[in-house]
């Protein structure tokens, strides 16, 4: 390739010849194609030009993308300056004595193929001097294309087809991604190499440790914001905002990051800092990467045609824990990157927070986890001064962006809102779970025939209950037969006002004997297995009427009247009657059909149960799904999912313990309000046994979840400290 380098133009032929001779030995042969390294963005060309005060020197290289001058032997007084500008005046950078370090200075680049350098001596007692030691010429498009392919340009890789697009393509279609890209900068290091960096806080930028490691390298790094194409299709490139690096605050080889400052932070003060996630990224989380691949204008990798089938075409996390420079320090993805993308932020689609620092790959490409980096840089970040950009702004013709006024926030409004909503969802979810358990119990235990019958069998087998039923049935039969009247008729003294005492004793004895016989037969039947079968049958047949009773529709053997829930045991009377007839007790045949009502529940809670049955049925259908939805919301939104799990576990254990306490207190109240306190405990225990067991399991599971979450949080904290 034929090249031309003109450093000084003067009217005197001798001066021109001297200048050309001084620079000519470094030209390349005609039509020779330069060979450039894959990681190269500029070619450093040697020079030896002493600047003369008051005289403008032109440094030019045909078709160069930019010209970046390095000065040495610099001596400036307090009012002396060096100006490096573009010939058309679009760019102009002034340097003073404070910008000089050890007699040297890397000036900011000037876009295009030429730069003018002028030394101004203010006659302040110091003779201003400077020499152009060398300059870096930016490789043009054809030279960039002649570099080794992207697959050998470094560890970053294009996976299949390059699906990244110019940032301008996202202005209208994806303003959130475009707005985030405004915080991303192209880095030109030592005039030759390139990386990507981004604003992590006020005057705090992040890039990779393998880009540079100390303040000496930071000072020879140029940081360019807004280096992007005007149109989605490419073409004209905006003139970027340019600042120089200043000081390295923190660097780490294992986590491959360098945190540094810039020399003129006021120039980028209007640009938003990107919020940083303190949570580990999740598998299949959607992400995007604003980057400067190959040192080219800003692009965004948001889609990928290399994702596995069924997962869509958005960039996403394919492996949330992958080995990087250390064990499980990285996560992986198929988003397209190239050499120069190193240091790019990997941003979560869901939260807008930076979850990773891109540093290498190989399809899949990889980023260091920000939840590991953050603890190491937190003390350097003024997080309460993080600026949140409401909407992306349009660059001016000169490349400057008019950003929004910064808002001081701790972790950003969005981060705080996520925590509030997540914690509220956690609380409501646990409350819903607790209520769902009670509602499901009401349906399964109270309104299901088989479950209900099983619970009442234990009542029928209780000795005190059998004795009470026997007494009730015996009384019904004795009353129906009218034993006293029959014995008096048999004695022949009916109607006699004052029968002899002997007759009275005989009648009384006969009556007691008959009653005793009836009671013994009833006792024998109630004590037999047949009674349990009768009880079971009666309860099963009565269950439908129980549901009706609880709904206020009394029908069948089980009825609700006021505060009582009553079971009709008339069938027991009929079976005992048959037993007496079979034993030749003919009088039993005359016993008419009677009702023998046994009170299962006698409490003020019966009307309450009736009122609540419909609500419980509704709750049994819907509360489990509501609880599940709330838990999903909580864990999706929570910035720290293990913290959300800890909250759910602790609150669940507390509410389960509270429910168990309420059941115990409810038993006391139920027994105290019951008419017959002897049977109330048995009835209460029979119907609440399953609910109590369920809450015990809830307590155990919730406590186990809380312990596991606490252990996980402690483990991750120790892992971060160790790394």
Image (cartoon, rainbow, N blue to C red):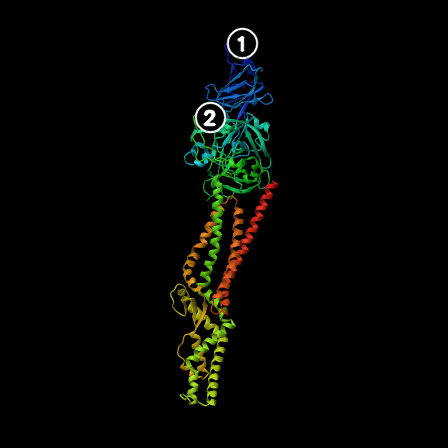
Locate residue 665, reporting x and y percent.
51, 61
Please tell me in which quadrant of the rendered image residue 393 appears.
top left
Q: Quick one: which residue is furthest to the right in this view?
A: 722
Q: Is residue 241 above or below residue 557?
A: above
Label 2: few (<14), some (14–19) or many (≥20) C-alpha neighbours in 10 Å: many
State yes or no: discs 1 and 2 in contact (Cβ < 8 Å): no
> Which residue is labeled 2 in the image?
239
Label of residue 396 in the image: none
Q: Is residue 644 above or below residue 456?
A: above
Label of residue 14 in the image: 1
**Given this view, does label 1 or label 2 mark the residue nearer the observer?**
2
Sequence order check, earlier mark of 1 and 2: 1
Locate residue 153, reporting x and y percent.
54, 31
* Most foreground residue, 222 or 570: 570
Q: Is residue 714 visible?
A: yes
Locate residue 134, reporting x and y percent.
56, 20
Q: Is residue 162 visible?
A: no
Locate residue 550, reporting x and y percent.
41, 64
Secondary element at image label 1 = helix
Label 1: few (<14), some (14–19) or many (≥20) C-alpha neighbours in 10 Å: few
Q: Is residue 557 above or below residue 388?
A: below
Q: Going 43% across and 79% down the picture, which residue do you hit?
A: 477
**Alpha-carbon distance for marks 1 and 2?**
37 Å
How many numbered badges does the structure rendering display? Answer: 2
Q: Going 48% across and 77% down the picture, which residue do you hit?
A: 525
């Amino acid at each position: 390739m034929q090249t031309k380098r003109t450093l000084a133009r003067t009217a005197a032929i001798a001066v021109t010849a001297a200048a050309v001779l001084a620079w000519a030995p470094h030209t390349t042969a005609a039509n020779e194609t330069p060979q450039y390294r894959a990681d190269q963005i500029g070619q450093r060309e040697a020079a030896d030009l002493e600047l003369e005060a008051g005289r403008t020197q032109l440094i030019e290289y045909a078709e160069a993308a930019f010209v970046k001058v390095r000065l040495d032997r610099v001596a400036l007084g307090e009012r002396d300056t060096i100006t490096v500008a573009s010939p058309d005046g679009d760019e102009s950078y002034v340097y003073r004595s404070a910008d000089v370090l050890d007699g040297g200075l890397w000036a900011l680049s000037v876009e295009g193929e030429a730069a003018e350098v002028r030394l101004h001596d203010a006659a302040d007692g110091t003779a201003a001097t400077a020499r152009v030691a060398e300059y870096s010429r930016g490789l043009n498009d054809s030279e960039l294309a002649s570099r080794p392919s992207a697959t050998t340009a470094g560890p970053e890789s294009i996976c299949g087809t390059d699906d990244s697009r110019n940032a301008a393509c996202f202005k209208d279609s994806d303003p959130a991604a475009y707005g985030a890209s405004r915080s991303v900068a192209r880095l030109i290091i030592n005039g030759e190499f390139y990386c990507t960096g981004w604003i992590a806080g006020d005057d705090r930028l992040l890039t990779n440790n393998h880009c540079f490691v100390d303040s000496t390298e930071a000072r020879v790094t140029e940081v360019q914001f807004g280096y992007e194409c005007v149109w989605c299709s490419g073409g004209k490139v905006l003139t970027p905002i340019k600042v120089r690096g200043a000081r390295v605050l923190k660097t780490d080889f294992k986590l491959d990051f360098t945190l540094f400052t810039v020399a003129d932070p006021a120039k980028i003060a209007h640009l938003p800092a990107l919020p940083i996630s303190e949570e580990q990224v999740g598998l299949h989380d959607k992400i995007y990467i604003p980057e400067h691949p190959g040192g080219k204008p800003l692009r965004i990798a948001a889609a990928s045609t290399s994702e596995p089938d069924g997962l869509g075409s958005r960039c996403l996390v394919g492996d949330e824990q992958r080995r990087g420079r250390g064990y499980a320090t990285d996560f992986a993805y198929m988003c397209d990157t190239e050499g120069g993308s190193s240091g790019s932020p990997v941003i979560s689609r869901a939260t807008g927070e930076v979850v990773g620092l891109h540093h290498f790959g190989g399809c899949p490409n990889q980023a260091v986890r920000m939840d590991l980096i953050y603890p190491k840089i937190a003390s350097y970040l003024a997080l309460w001064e993080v600026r949140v950009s409401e909407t992306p702004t349009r660059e001016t013709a000169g490349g400057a962006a008019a950003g929004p006024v910064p808002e001081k926030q701790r972790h950003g409004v969005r981060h705080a809102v996520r925590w509030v909503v997540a914690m509220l969802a956690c609380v409501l979810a646990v409350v819903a779970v607790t209520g769902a358990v009670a509602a499901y119990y009401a349906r399964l235990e109270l309104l299901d025939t088989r479950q209900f019958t099983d619970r009442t069998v234990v009542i029928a087998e209780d000795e005190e209950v059998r004795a009470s039923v026997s007494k009730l049935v015996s009384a019904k039969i004795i009353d129906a037969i009218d034993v006293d009247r029959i014995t008096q008729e048999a004695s022949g003294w009916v109607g006699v006002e004052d029968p002899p005492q002997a007759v009275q004793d005989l009648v009384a004895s006969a009556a007691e004997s008959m009653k005793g016989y009836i009671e013994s037969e009833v006792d024998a039947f109630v004590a037999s297995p047949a009674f349990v079968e009768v009880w079971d049958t009666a309860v099963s047949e009565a269950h439908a009427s129980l549901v009706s009773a609880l709904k206020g529709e009394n029908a069948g053997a089980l009825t609700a009247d006021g505060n009582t829930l009553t079971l009709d045991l008339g069938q027991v009377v009929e079976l005992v009657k048959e037993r007496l007839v079979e034993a030749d007790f003919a009088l039993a045949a005359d016993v008419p059909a009677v009702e023998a009502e046994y009170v299962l529940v006698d409490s003020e809670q019966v009307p309450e149960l009736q009122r609540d049955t419909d609500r419980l049925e509704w709750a049994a259908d819907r509360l489990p799904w509501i609880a599940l939805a709330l838990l999903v919301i909580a864990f999706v939104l929570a910035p720290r999912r293990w913290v959300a799990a800890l909250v759910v576990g602790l609150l669940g254990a507390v509410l389960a313990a509270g429910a168990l306490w309420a059941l115990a207190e409810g038993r006391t109240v139920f027994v105290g309000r019951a008419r017959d306190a002897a049977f109330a405990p048995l009835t209460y225990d029979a119907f609440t046994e399953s609910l109590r067991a369920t809450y015990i399991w809830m307590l155990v599971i919730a406590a186990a979840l809380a312990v596991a979450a606490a252990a996980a949080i402690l483990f991750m904290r120790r892992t971060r400290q160790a790394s």
